[in-house]
Amino acid sequence: MKSTQNEWIPARIALASLVEVINPTDAVATLRTRLADGIISARAQVARGLGVAADAEALPTRFWRFIESERWDVGDFSAHVNRETWSAYDTELERLGVETLISRLRNTDDEVPLRASAMSAAGRPRSTKWEDWIAALALMAANGKISGSMTETKLLSDVNATLAEMDIEELPRATVQKAAVRVLQMFREEGI
């Protein structure tokens, strides 16, 4: 069953889901553009200076055109609009908009689950911590903190530090090592 327009997901889950389809930098840019154009709706649990009447209100599209600070991991964003600072905390995105975007990128009309499959390729239960690891990786990429010249050890150390900042437990090295190698390979292939 398709999601309804009233369902919301945290910004970090939206970004992590999109990163499964496109690279982290493009994922952030794509979400920002679609939010600014009103294709995907967003709301903040707490909003300041946005002219919204109450908390958990929809964020105006022009907010996204002036983003200066973004923390996808916790859903905190700020913008400077008309000499005023606007802030949104604990931001959530409309699930249907994100699912539709991912379906189009995958070129399919099938419903796209926003959570990874329950089993890993090795047949073990998939860790639910992967979404946090991917979100931390996407956040680092969006902030220019990943480059193809990094060592695998440095990348894993930096991802773990980002997870620690979010008060999230790191994944075992053996679990993420192949993914880290592939991320660095992709960055090198792109010349980043």
Image: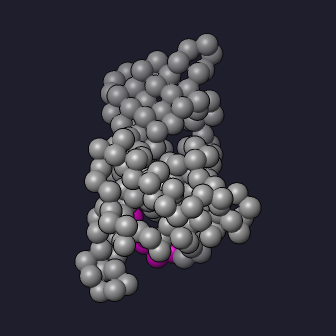
Please report the residue visible at 27 percent of the width from the left and 82 percent of the height from the top.
124
Q: Nearer the viewer, residue 156 or 103?
A: 156
The quarter of the picture where residue 129 lies is: bottom left
Query: Which quarter of the figure is the C terminus placed in?
Result: bottom right
List the single residue furthest toward the top.
Answer: 83
Q: Which residues are magenta?
A: 109-114
Residue 44 x, y percent position in the rendering: 39, 34
Q: Is residue 37 left or right of residue 189?
A: left
Q: Residue at x 29, y 86 (%)?
A: 123
Asked if the magenta segment contains residue 112, the reply would be yes
Of the pair 40 and 126, the residue shown nearer to us: 126
Residue 100: x and y in percent read 51, 63
Foreground residue, 139 or 149? 149
Return the residue found at the far left: 125
Viewer can see residue 124: yes
The image's colouring method is one colour
Viewed as shown, does residue 39 lie left or right of 92? right
Residue in the picture at 61% in, 46% down: 144
**Viewer-closest of 186 and 44:** 186
| Residue 26 visible, this angle | no
The residue drawn where x is 34% and y is 76% is 117
Magenta portion: prevailing SS class: loop
Task: Quarter of the image for the N terminus: give it.
Answer: bottom left
The question of residue 147 being in magenta is answered with: no
Q: Position of residue 26 (x, y in %)?
A: 63, 55
Residue 75 placement: quadrant = top left
Q: How many marks?
A: 0
190 vs 10: above or below:
below
Q: Residue furthest right?
A: 191
